[in-house]
Amino acid sequence: MNPVVPVAGGTQRRKAGRNRTKAPTAADYGMPAQAPQPEPLNQEQEELLAWLKTMKFKRARFGGVSEEDVWKKISELNRRYDACLRAERERYNALLESRGIKGWPNA
């Protein structure tokens, strides 16, 4: 018989044994299933989030994923992330100007 162990929130759960059939989830440890996601600040961030949610890798012939496809995805992610950073920098500079503060000289 597996002993019962305390978890956060005061509930009890059985201690995992060798014959456990599924991997533990966040709920097993008293945590919310998903952390709240912040709202995207600009269009570029919305596009990046949508792309990440739909991104899939090509499978390799003998297990795993195609290395070439992974490098293409990393390159695309970098391009999209740079666009997000540029848009955020523009938003930040506009906010500084609206408050009468001069931005960084190189920005």
Image (tube, rainbow, N blue to C red):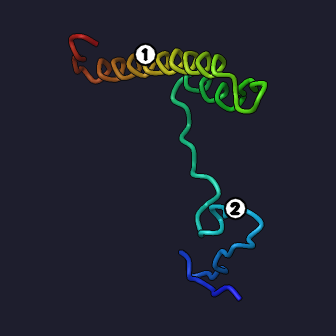
Residue 60, label in figure: none
* Residue lying at 77% horizontally and 67% vertically, measured from the top left: 21
Q: Position of residue 71 (x, y in %)?
A: 58, 18
* Residue lying at 66% horizontally and 18% vertically, measured from the top left: 69
Q: Is residue 71 left or right of residue 88?
A: right
Q: Is residue 94 left or right of residue 13?
A: left
Choose the circle earlier in sequence order: 1 or 2.
Answer: 2
* Quadrant of the image containing the C terminus: top left
Classify mark 2: residues with Cα within 10 Å, few (<14), some (14-19) or many (20+). few
* Residue lying at 74% horizontally and 70% vertically, measured from the top left: 20
Viewer-closest of 98 and 4: 4
The amino acid type of the residue labelled 1 equals Arg
In the image, is residue 19 above or below residue 65? below
* Quadrant of the image containing the N terminus: bottom right
* Residue lying at 75% horizontally and 63% vertically, measured from the top left: 22
Viewer-closest of 84 and 28: 28
Q: Which residue is mark 2?
A: 23
Q: Position of residue 75 (x, y in %)?
A: 55, 16
Q: CA distance from mark 1 to mark 2?
A: 40 Å
The amino acid type of the residue labelled 2 equals Ala
Q: Is residue 45 left or right of residue 87?
A: right
Q: Which residue is mark 1?
A: 86
